[in-house]
Image (cartoon, rainbow, N blue to C red):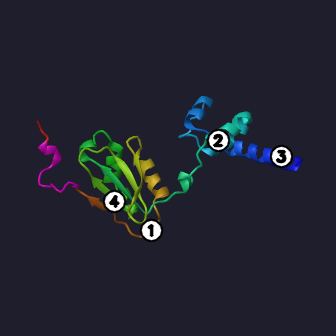
Amino acid sequence: MLRFVVILLLALSCQQILAELTAADCRELGFIKAQLMCSSCDKLDDYGLDTIKPHCKQCCTLDQQPAAQRTYAKAILEVCTCKFRAYPQIQAFIQSGRPAKFPNLQIKYVRGLDPVVKLLDAGGKVQETLSITKWNTDTVEEFFETHLAKEGAGKSSYSVVEDVDGDDEEDYLRTNRI
């Protein structure tokens, strides 16, 4: 009987340790549940904060595959030419020979849109959308080198979609003159 009680207490304490706290509970403990990754909890020992590690583990979200290891089958860089003045680094990237290095990169000109990169899986479904407004030309190139699948080595073509809306009769800048 004593053995049964000990096992029951042990099981209850393990359940308590493995229990996940609510977002409100985590906030009271000083953690933001939606933003806390479990890998961050593992680093608490390095700073002598091992006393809060159990609470951290109860509030954390399991890490996804590290961003440096994720690759995507295709990417679409969407930007408006009217925004080139505000984002000269994106204009420089597009007008240089750099996009030709990435055969699975498509450039779309979308009216009024700040520059974004849409990352797609092999089925063409958007997996992630990133704003690249603060990126420089080298960062954009390095990102594509790291995160685009290395398909079609030797190919040096990429596609450019001039007008997504289908009304290519008049230039956007000409139609918006005062």
What secondary structure predominates along the stretch shown in magenta? loop
Depth check: give the residue in front, 17 or 29.
Answer: 17
Q: Mark 2 points at which residue?
A: 58
Q: Is mark 1 on a helix, strand or loop?
A: loop
Amino acid type shown at disc 2: Gln
For the residues labelled 3 and 4, the Cα–Cα distance comes to: 65 Å
Q: Mark 4 points at which residue?
A: 106
Magenta residues span: 163-175
Given this view, does label 2 or label 3 mark the residue nearer the observer?
Answer: 3
Q: Residue 31 carries which label?
A: none
Amino acid type shown at disc 4: Gln
Q: In which quarter of the image is residue 112?
A: top left
Circle 1 residues within 10 Å: few <14, some 14–19, many ≥20: few
Circle 3 residues within 10 Å: few <14, some 14–19, many ≥20: few
CB-based contact (under 8 Å), mark 2 and mark 3? no
For the residues labelled 2 and 1, the Cα–Cα distance comes to: 41 Å
**Residue drawn at (16%, 44%) of the image:** 173
Q: Mark 3 points at which residue?
A: 5
Q: Is residue 111 left or right of residue 117?
A: left
Q: Earlier in the sequence, mark 4 or mark 2?
A: 2
Amino acid type shown at disc 1: Glu
Q: Name the residue under label 1.
A: 151
Amino acid type shown at disc 3: Val
**Residue drawn at (14%, 41%) of the image:** 176
